Image: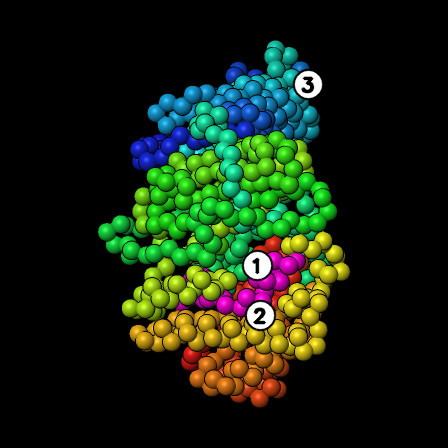
Amino acid sequence: MKFAVLTVLLLLLGASAVDAQLYPHGALRLGMTGGVNVGGEEATLKYAEYSVHPYGTVTLEHYLEDDIAVTGSLFAGTLSAEISGRAQFPNYGTHVITAYNSKYYGLSGGLNFILPTFWQLTPVVRPRLGFLVHQTRVDGENGFEARLSRAALTYGLGGGFEFPVSPTVAFTFGYDLVLTNSDDLDGLRSGKKNDALSVFTAGINVLIRPGGEPDRLRRPKEERFSTLQSTAIPSAQRRLRPNGVGTGEGGFDSTGTQGNARPAVTDAERNPSEYPDAAEAGGGTELRPLSATKEEAAPELRGLTLNPGRPAEGEEALPVRQGGSLQLLTHLFITPIQRLSDLEEDPELLILRAWQTGSERMQLKCYVEMLRNGVTFYQGNADLVLDGEQSEFHANDFLNLTQLIDYNDGYALLPRGNYLIRVSTVAWDHDLSSLSKAKFLNVDLRPIFGAKEEEAREVIVQKAVDVAAEGRDELVVNFFQATATAVDRMRLEKTDPERMRASLRLAPVSMTGSAREQYLSDEIESSLNEALKLQSMAGTVGHAQNLKVILSEVFFPIDSDLLNEESRLNLDNVARLLNQHPELFAEIRGYASDVGDESYNEMLASRRAQRVLEYLIRQKMHAYRLVLSAIGKQQLVAATGDDARLGRKVEIILRNRGM
């Protein structure tokens, strides 16, 4: 009774705050319920009073259509009674039966039919068919005891109500009448009628995979056609992650494949150093709403992004890979926002541009994930149409803005952090896929740059290849253009398994000897000049210690910490330039790809960082100016971008004081 009263109070408290649960096609839910079975067996009806017995189920629901699900359940329970009078049953002859105790467990399947919601309650009707196995002990006078184990067919009809407490969790309570074809579920056969279970339950249902947007909520989508060309990233060559662990990077041949896209690992898993909150919050793909920020207390943070918010007129697409096959390409444009509700007011703040190398009519499925500091706060999908060479879609075309805003307090100011939007676009009929990402930072640059905030912002936007908020006050800026240039080159290359196992080559293959040395020297010197310019701005207000600048990156072969010739040339230039600036200190941060055993990769990342540190010391750099980043839970293994080679690296990060 106390449990029932508490459940009702919780439901009433949440009634005014939660929208009705959605049951879209493709959704997958896990239900866990507990309750009681109230009598129903023949012996109880005739010789004993009704009593309650525990009953529990675990149910998996898959929605084939909106509001219609196929289900599978595991259930278990008990039956017992003390028999009054001198009860005798045909199957036990003249023995007088005094008690029975039965345990049963089984499997059932059926359908869930979701009825229209009223007052936040959603009625559910559920027919079931299955079987159970029971093990029963029967006791009688004079020490008589009998044991039996039998199977029985079950069938019945149930129903109940669900009440949502969040977009992914709902309370459920209901009643089921479970009939059987057995006359001895209680071990006592009288020959009059079959036994049955009368079950009352309460529990929760948890959404473990969101489905498509329900038809009744789907906004009409205009099929958009544009004559503009776009600067875009070609379709991602997907990396498949192995099922097993324990082998580290070396246990996986990192190759790419196009088509059959799946949701990628989160960027917190790929680069946890950029997302320090992810480890504390659990990371992974668990859906966590953004912490509400009261408007009157929130700082007016300004967004920062390196990619254009809106595609410019006359932009042309990057060259596509050679080969002549049909390709799907996408690119995501984001204008920094201060509130999630900004997307509702102006959907063109977020634009997905899609195009193809042919002229097929493509039915597209977009899987959208939004993250802050590596922690997912929105997941959804949408159906789009690419009719012709290219189309442009806005935020209201591929986001459920109502769910996004309501679940994340979307009218409040966004908290500080790194925001990433990832869209996996799949054309199932053509076996094509494309992954596009857009990132913006919600940061306040004034504590670091003071009056030179605007000047620093311009330098970062125009010159940096990446930027991230780190910790509570720090900013990490990457000016090392050579990696970005190498990534652009490899997008046009045909995937070669042997090449994927080698380290990423920064200089073009055509460059050798002195030309390659000069290229690497120029790239690092350019990165240092921008770093010094930015640190000078930060020094004007005395907070340069909160600025980190990535001077260079060194890449490694799979499952290796050995430096190749290009890496040594790279580090020679780093040492030469840093020896010319004794006021600068360097942080050495190691990474490994996200494939294989986590502890092994953590050790491998540490070995790589140690290898770089030792090499720089041999190049006459003082050890007190160098420090290894702590490799821990928040700064583990990383594989940024779409290529495993990008995660097998060491970063040399400049700071203007010791650490």
Give SS at disc 2. strand
* 195 and 88: which is toward the camera: 195
> Closer to the camera: disc 3 or disc 2?
2
- Residue 91 tag number: 3
Give, as a three-letter code, the residue at label 3: Asn
User: Where 88 falls versus 543 (above or below)?
Assistant: above
* 67 and 511: which is toward the camera: 511
Segment colored magenta: 468-490
Q: Where is residue 413 in the image (x, y as percent from the top left)?
A: 32, 50
Q: Which of the marked residues, 1 or 2, is nearer the chain's N terminus? A: 2
Give SS at disc 3. helix
Residue placed at 51% from the left, 48% from the top? 315
| Residue 469 belongs to magenta span | yes
Work out how far the residue at label 3 is from the one at label 2, CA to CA, in angstroms. Answer: 82 Å
Disc 1 target residue: 640
Disc 2 target residue: 553
Q: Which of the marked residues, 3 or 2, is nearer the chain's N terminus? A: 3
Quadrant where the N terminus is found in the figure: top left
Q: How dense is the environment of label 1, judged by Cα within 10 Å: few (below 14), some, or many (20 and up)?
A: many
